Image: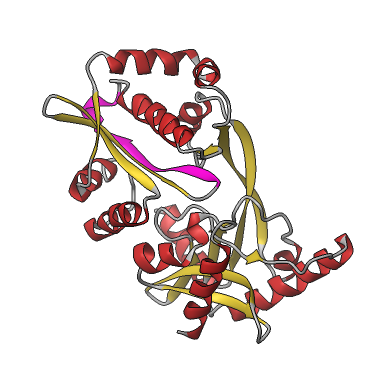
Amino acid sequence: MKAKKLFKEFTDQHAEKLPFSLQFNWWNEVVANNWDVAILNNGEETYGIMPYFIRNKGPWSFISNAHFTPYCGPFLVYPEGQKTTTRIAFEHRAYRELIEQLPTFSEYSQNFHLDFNNALAFQWNGFTETNRYTYILSLEQEEKALWTGLRENNRKQIKKAEKTIKISETNDASLLQNILNQSIENKIILDYFQRMITFVDKHKCGKVWKATEGADVHAVLLSISDSKNAYYLLGGNAQEFKNSGAMSLLTWQALLHFKQLGIKQFNFEGSSVAAVEKYFRGFGGDLVSFKRLEKHNSKSLEVAKKLKGSK
């Protein structure tokens, strides 16, 4: 409990610098269960944090990103006036100490936040590093420029949807669950959706929208923001209305909403699914890479995966 208390104090002090998914309130109120945090504290101040989600399945334990928690990894506060060589040495030492605090695990797999760029200490401790990608769209440009930057098909979809689709806010967790679980492989429990809705409402850091035509709900979108970025946290179409253009209209409305609030960037969170990547790319953002760190400690788990794959 001491580590979580220090994590809260760290968030209170550095909230303006932290992505929402590295803040105590998100983990405490939304993730809620099966999480912990590694902490660096010199007796006077906390200067590093690394929250993680851990779950058990059979004899194995897994450390990963929690549901709808896009970026994890370590976050450090650096001493002032460091030279480059001193800064890198500081990172090596800090990351090594955070790694040492992790519990025993069979498999580790986390996406790290976009500002993380030094994985050497993780590599030296047996982790492998790969690149993942997202699209970041600047919201500091004029609305006309945003519109012009859209792919032609996205503009057509938005214009099509505007003729018949109504956009409104919602706090219906079961609606999110019903539509999102149509496309999510691992079904998410209702309480988790409710916790996300409660979080964005309580902290005034996002919106949940639905796109409707009469009594039919075509699509839903939940977007969240921190001090610098807004995020496409979750969104989906009802299968029978996936070609109505509602999802494109929802996303466009989210861009305009966060632009009006003065948020600088919109992060689409990326996808390795080709069709989803094409959709996100159509909004005109810049392709940006981030790191995924993995480590496998269990031979029995690897054997079990191979046996499952061979069936």
Locate residue 248 relative to residue 169 in the image: left or right. right
Locate residue 118 relative to residue 131 in the image: left or right. right
Q: Nearer the viewer, residue 29 or 98?
A: 29
Which residues lie in the magenta part? 228-242
Locate residue 241 relative to residue 225 in the image: left or right. left
Q: In the rendered view, tell whether residue 193 sits above or below residue 57.
A: above
Q: Which residue lies at the image location 57% right of the left edge and 69% below the top edge? A: 50
Q: Is residue 4 on the magenta stretch?
A: no
Q: Nearer the viewer, residue 274 or 27?
A: 27
Q: In the rendered view, tell whether residue 21 sits above or below residue 289.
A: below
Residue 207 image position (x, y, % from top left):
34, 43
Q: Which residue lies at the image location 45% right of the left edge and 84% below the top edge? A: 1
Q: Is residue 234 on the magenta stretch?
A: yes
The answer, for residue 231, to whether it is visible in the render is: yes
Q: In the rendered view, tell whether residue 166 sits above or below residue 125.
A: above
Locate residue 174 relative to residue 141 in the image: left or right. left
Say how the picture is coloured.
Answer: secondary structure
Residue 227 image position (x, y, % from top left):
52, 50
Residue 285 image position (x, y, % from top left):
57, 29
Residue farthest to the left, as pictured: 215
The answer, for residue 183, to whether it is visible in the render is: no
Q: Which residue lies at the image location 45% right of the left edge and 33% below the top edge? A: 260
Prevailing secondary structure of the magenta residues = strand
Q: Nearer the viewer, residue 44 or 72?
A: 44
Residue 162 image position (x, y, % from top left):
29, 17
